[in-house]
Image (tube, rainbow, N blue to C red):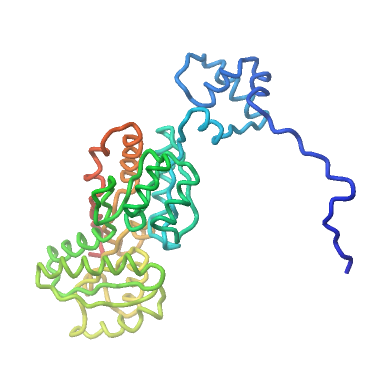
Amino acid sequence: MVPVDDRQDGPTAAPGPARPTSADVARRAGVSRATVSHVLNGTEHPVSEQTRQRVLAAARELQYAPNASARALRAGRSNIVLVPMSRSPVVPGEDRFLENLDRELAERDLVLLMQGDRNTTGMSGAYAWAELRPAAVYVNVSRGTRTAVELLRRAGVRAVLLTGVPGVTYAPTVPLDPAAVAGLATRHLLARGCRRLACLVPGGPLAEVPERRYDAVLEAAAAGNMPVERVDCELSSDSVAPVVDRWRDPACRPDAVYANSDQFAILLIHKLRDAGLEVPRDIAVVGSGDHPLGAALRPALTTATFDVPAIARVVASSIRRLLDGQDLDPGLEAALRPHLIIRESG
């Protein structure tokens, strides 16, 4: 093996091409640097559409990318909304929410920035988040402690918006409760006439939300004196097969199952069919999340879900309003209510 000498004693690599600047864009477009700044930053300044298109074309040809940090320093403020990644590597609906939030923030001249450390919380989290100099931070209430919020504000973060339950008094909060869908589904099954309920409770990295949903099912079922069978399981045929086999006996069979999520509901319906049980005649099944496959399933899946685009819209609007010194979006409470999509399964 030939040893590798990492010293730079020999000829150095040729430097790469110089990074284009706003001055280069201005020369290419035949305008001033101020005009380039107005066009690329979207500021309110009288620029003709022809000039605007010429500047944009020059920026594309030169592959010019504005320096967001420098722009923030010049303006004296940032337009970054920092969102720490959730503690769980898999949160149902999170990707869809973030896609919608990114679009809604962009429409309000704000930029979504994900911070990748899933474990930071409290003061350690606040130090890490503040280093990125965001305009706003949107984080779960369990991680945005009082001391963390105070540190962020002292560091110049102009808006801190928390999410989750219970709400707090030291920062505005989006009271989004992922367990609300479980209570809604249970009340629907009670109104449907079901009197014996089973609830799937997935374990593993998703355990926190299913446990809270199970508690919500118990609370709603207690109002109707409905017993609830807890079924601990994983997302696999082998995991749910034993309980489905037991439900072949009518004496052991629930009237309905709240499956926690649509993925588990779809798996359960397939296993019930394999066992010779019909949905909803023998057992009704309700999921959560409005997974696209649920509508295509036969029987089509009844599901309790949130309006994710609406939530992203009011969250983005609330962040913009906080930055502008206003209260949260007045439509926040209505957007956070779950709703049922009633189909054939329950």
Rendering quarter of residue 50: top right
Relative to 229, is 123 on the left or the right? right
**Count of number-bearing discs:** 0
* Nearer to the camera, 189 or 205: 205
Percent coordinates x, y for residue 222 in the rendering: 12, 70
Rendering quarter of residue 229: bottom left
Q: Looking at the image, is 177 positioned above or below residue 270? A: above
Residue at 68%, 18% (x, y): give it.
27
Quarter of the figure with the C terminus: bottom left
* Nearer to the camera, 265 or 54: 54
Residue at 83%, 41% (x, y): give it.
14
Quarter of the figure with the N terminus: bottom right
Residue at 52%, 14% (x, y): give it.
48
Percent coordinates x, y for residue 91 in the rendering: 39, 60
* Nearer to the camera, 174 or 345: 174
Rendering quarter of residue 277: bottom left
Q: Looking at the image, is 316 positioned above or below residue 165? A: above
Q: Looking at the image, is 29 positioned above or below residue 67? A: above
Relative to 36, is 260 on the left or the right? left
Percent coordinates x, y for residue 174 in the rendering: 28, 48
Percent coordinates x, y for residue 330 in the rendering: 23, 38
* Nearer to the camera, 135 or 37: 135
